[in-house]
Structures are given as structure tokens and as C-alpha cells.
Image: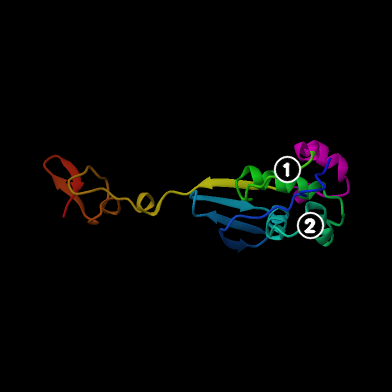
Amino acid sequence: MTNQINPLKPKRIEALTREFHDELLVYDGEKHKAHCLNKTAAVVWLECRGDATVPEIAKKLEGYFHSSDDTLVRLSVAKLRKAGLLEKTEAVLDGRESLNRRDVLKRIRLMAVVALPLVTTMLVPLPAAAASCFPLLHTCSSGVQCCSGRCGLSGLRLVCLP
């Protein structure tokens, strides 16, 4: 049963975003994670500004989903919450957030499978780790591995040279 006193008003976290065709890349700088959202999840995430309830978001998105049923929005919110893309709140979804993909497809038979929300999460290395290179005299196989850009012979092995 929906909590009438404190209705769920999902609010997205502060994050950097980039659009790629029908997908949205969301980077959480605090946790160093990137999330790729398909169109359904992206539209729902963008609507989660903290001022609308799930049914209100579903009504706003009727043009995208061709249905005012809030099942897709609830599934999207559950996936976004699991990925850490929504701020934590006291309110919780009622029991319908536990729907699986099969249950959702039964409820929205006319919609294509591509409408189901998809959130893919990737761990992003810190800048220092992403740009790491081998120090002087470390074993190497090419110059691109070395901080100096030079890999050469020292005795019988290849090492990073100054």
C-alpha cells in the first residue's frame, strides 16, 4: 500500500551526464562509477527531481510509454535505486517494486521489450590509476608503457629508460 503521508518522490543524485543517441551515461564522481541508462531508465531518471511521485512521473511519461500504467516507472525506480542513482529517502515503494521482468511483460503486453529499463554500471578508476605508467627501470615491452616513453635494453632485458 502506498504511504499517503510520505509518498515516494524519487530524487536523483548529483552526477555528470552525457547523452549518446537513446542512452544516457551518468557518472557518479563520489563513488567513481559510471552508469549507462537505456532510453526508458534515462527518461525516468531525468524526471526524478524530487517533486513528483511515481504515478505523476508515469502520467508525464505517457507519451514515451503509450501507457499511464506506472509499472515501468516503478521498475525503473527500483533499478535506479539499486544502482545508487537515487538519493536515499524514508519512503519506500509499495510491494510492486519487486516485480520481475516477466511480471512486467505480462502487465504491459503491447509494449516492446526495448521499453524495459536497463541500467548498466561500470567501475571507473581514479585518474591517477587510469593514467598509470611504469617507472624507470621497470620491465616493459614498448615505450607506451613507460612514463618516460622510452623502453630499451639494459643488460639482457627491456626496461623503462630516462
Instruction: Indicate left or right for 71 with 157 as reference.
Output: right
In front here: 9 or 69? 9
Residue 119: x and y in percent read 64, 47
Magenta segment range? 95-116
- Does residue 3 appear left or right of residue 126 in this picture? right
What kind of residue is marked 1?
Val
- 1 lies above or below 37: above
Q: Is residue 59 above or below residue 93?
A: below
Location of the C terminus by quadrant is: bottom left
Q: Looking at the rendering, which quadrant does residue 101 occupy?
A: top right
The x and y percentages for residue 125 are 43, 48
What label sits on residue 57 in the rendered view?
2
The image position of residue 37, as x and y in percent, is: 64, 53
Q: How many marks?
A: 2
Give the amino acid type for the residue marked by disc 2 in the picture.
Ile
Which residue is disc 1 drawn over? Answer: 92
Asked whether residue 5 is drawn in magenta, I would say: no
